[in-house]
Image: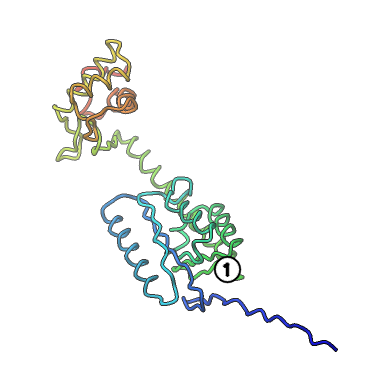
Amino acid sequence: MAARNVEIIPAKPKFIRQGLTEQPKLKVAAYCRVSTSEDEQLSSFEAQVDYYTRYIQEKENWEFVEVYCDEGISATSTKKRDGFKRMIADALDGKIDLIITKSVSRFARNTVDTLTTVRQLKEKGVEVYFEKENIYTLDSKGELLITIMSSLAQEESRSISENVTWGQRKRFADGKVSLPYGQFLGCMKGEDGLPKIVESEAKTVRLIYRLFLEGKTPSGIAKHLTQRGIPTPAGKSKWQVSTVESILINEKYKGDAAAKDLHGRFPHQKEKG
């Protein structure tokens, strides 16, 4: 009998959790996000980036890919998170084997987004590890745990949103008006917490309304302000049409939501009947 030719196919190396792998190295990335741009949150953001960079690079058999970040973005939906979307695209392209993130709530607070993304990654063999919950998505129990945790996170987000909405309604009922003082032309927050007129800026607001009443379009007003070298609310030299329009329709300037310290300060405002 003729001898058979036997071809030996070596087993592919398997990834072992806790960062230990055979060759090739596991390509690892991290995702971090903070939901506001407050100073203390930004400090937390920087700390997360530093932590994950060190954590991944210290693993001998891990290959550091990148720490993907979104700064000042809410997790309620993934639609506006550019860093998140870029990370998922890279993972689906085979550039990432494992994604590490702090918790399910940092990844997404929307159950549908979480599960859809996890399943997309799972089809490509990409695993996500949620540190706080100690969940690996390629575990048999992973998807069940994610569904539970993500649902809880989504409920928490809804509750927070309702509390914020209630707080705003209470302020309105008390006759208090919130102002984004950072870029609100013509006003600053006074020592008593009430709006205080900044006369140099208020002149620009009056000019915008006067030009509009004289028949100039928002585009014409923007051009006029730019030519005169008047700075925008953000301190820029060039006025955009949208900036002029936002001032013209702003209820604070129009008097629809006039605080007692503001009402009557701008000559275009009229008493409400």
Q: Is residue 148 left or right of residue 197?
A: right
Which residue is rendered at x = 27% and y = 58% of the image?
43
Q: Is residue 9 left or right of residue 250?
A: right
Residue that badge 1 annotates: 138
Q: In the displayed structure, would residue 185 be above or below residue 31? A: above
Which residue is rendered at x = 21% and y = 27% of the image?
262
Q: Amino acid at mark 1?
A: Leu
Observer able to see residue 221: yes
Where's residue 143, x and y in %? 59, 64
Among the 4 quarters of the image, the one containing residue 221: top left
Q: Quadrant of the C terminus?
A: top left
Q: Quadrant of the N terminus?
A: bottom right
Among the 4 quarters of the image, the one containing residue 249: top left
Which residue is rendered at x = 53% and y = 69% of the image?
136
Where's residue 183, x and y in %? 25, 36
As drawn, the residue found furthest toward the top would be: 214
Where's residue 111, x and y in %? 54, 54
Instruction: Identify which residue, 138 or 111, lies in the foreground.
Output: 138
Q: Is residue 124 left or right of residue 218?
A: right
Which residue is rendered at x = 42% and y = 52% of the image?
83
Q: In the displayed structure, would residue 102 be above or below residue 195? A: below
Instruction: Identify which residue, 176 or 18, lies in the foreground.
Output: 18
Q: Secondary structure at mark 1?
A: loop
Where's residue 134, x and y in %? 48, 71
